[in-house]
Amino acid sequence: MFKDMPFWDPDLLQRTLAEQAKDLASLAAAFGGTVPAGQSNFDALGKPLIERYQRLFMPPGLGATGGPPAQAGAAFLRYQQAMERFAKQANAIAVNAGERLAAALAQTGPAAPPITTLRELHSLWIECGDAAYAAAAHGDEFADAQAELVAACIELRAGLAAP
Amino acid sequence: MTRLALDPARMAEEMAEFSRRMTLAAQQLATLDVRAEGCSPRREVLRRDKMVLWRYEPSAPSAGLAPLVICYALVNRPYMMDLQPGRSLIRGLLAHGLDVYLVDWGYPGPEDSHHSLDDYVNRDLGACIERVREAHGVEAVNLLGVCQGGTMSLCHTALHPAQVRNLITMVTPVDFHTGENLLSKWARKLDVDRLVNALGNVPGELLNAAFIALMPLRLTARKYAGLADIADDRAALENFLRMERWIHDSPDQAGAAFREFIRAFFQENRLVRGGLEIGGRAVNLRAISCPILNVFASQDHLVPPSASIPLKDPTASRDYTPFAFDGGHIGIYVSRSAQELLPRTIAQWLASR
């Protein structure tokens, strides 16, 4: 219990709250003119989303977050492949989230009031991110990839437990 | 980007202020020690293995109704029903003169991995209802099932219809295969045999991760960013922490019951399709003829209304009342609007039967 709860772990709490400030900094960088050359605003916003989505895809409680164990090579390979499959999903979702954000920012009219603060932009970014995620998460490929990752984690766990 | 009207100088100020307030929130949270095991006086009336049946102290003259037994889910902890003064469905029910009991399933350990749905639905819930019937000298109780506990209550009522006078289901999945049910879509692909065979009990953290994954940014980034707004409000931080503690207080799930529940309900949808058996006995919703109040939340992301609403047809009840609460799966217990509305709705519905 409470193992993954930020408020029972001061370090995790600091990291969790710092991550929110980092999100705002990413938004400020993306829309404040400091985006690295060669990147669009929305590319710059994709990274925090991808990190979050991928973190979701590492189910806790299955003991499969360590480094490559020699005695569980095949299982670890399967786990890595399952993670790669999810990384592709996460990338696609992040791209879609960026497209949704671009479309939302381009809207005009009474239903689309001006965005004057970073927090308003943050809120819109979250809505677009979750909408893109939901669109993917309801699909078969997502469910298949998730089920494969759980199965791979279990196999890896069994491999690690073997003498 | 016609909507963007961000001023660079103001953005810098906002960034600095946000960071300052998040630091303040972290400092404040570190000083809080919120216990969240319920807030209303109660006493234990039955204990069996990890399960405890609680009876709450009355807070108002009795309404003269049959006692109300609340059957909570196996997932998460039941103190959500009595989180704190001002956010307690149980306090609201007590204030209407109801005699309230709560089934608390506890924290299954490795020794409970063979605990089956038969154990939970027939033996344990049955023992609770039997104890309450004996204590009050009544033929039947009023049964209120919450979320998965509602599904279990439906099964118990179908198997033991004479024990239940009125049935209330809250945010209860009935049809597990409706289009909006994301959790069900994921569960259908799960190799539950492999999972349970490998783990014995299923870790609560795994279920928690699945619940958060339903709306990952809203349930993490937005929630934590909101701390900046309440960083200097100690009461609000305590509320936040109490809720956060509940969210992460996830009991492991007894492997045998988890396997049965995923397979029979999520994967095979047997409650509505038929063919459900618990403890070797067929569970047929047509065996339920008592009055039913079906409370669902119109914005429920976990148990979408489409999963709850189909309770209307498969039972034999001629007294079926649907009630849509304008809120979400958690707001139905703790939101301000729920505090007065739900206890009154339940108490009035029971009183008129």
Image (cartoon, rainbow, N blue to C red):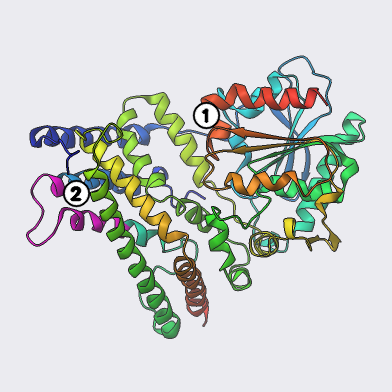
Q: Is residue B82 magenta?
A: no
State whether residue B218 is above or below residue B57. Answer: below
Chain of the residue displaying label 2: A
Q: Which quadrant holds the C terminus of chain B?
A: top right
Magenta-span inclusion, residue A49: yes
Circle 1: residue type = Ser
Q: Position of residue B50 (x, y in %)?
A: 71, 49
Mark 2 → mark 1, Cα distance in angstroms: 33 Å
Residue corresponding to mark 1: B335
The circle on residue A43 is none
Which span is picked out in magenta?
A29-51
Q: Is residue B105 shown to the viewer in this render? A: no
Mark 2 Cα within 10 Å, few/some/many (few <14, many 20+)? many
Q: Split into 4 quadrants, where in the image is the N terminus of chain B?
A: top left
Which element carries disc 2, helix, strand or loop? helix
B28 lies above or below A38: above
> What is the chain identity of the residue bearing mark 1?
B
| Residue that mark 2 sits on | A26
Q: Residue at x 30, y 58 (%)?
A: A96
Residue B252: which quarter of the image?
bottom right
What residue is rendered at 44% in x and 60% in y?
Answer: A137
Tell me which amino acid carries mark 2. Answer: Ser
Residue B327's spot in the image, x, y percent? Answer: 53, 34
Instruction: Tell me where residue B202 sits by quadrant.
Output: bottom right
Q: Looking at the picture, does residue A55 appear above or below residue B44?
A: below
Q: Position of residue A46 (x, y in %)?
A: 25, 57
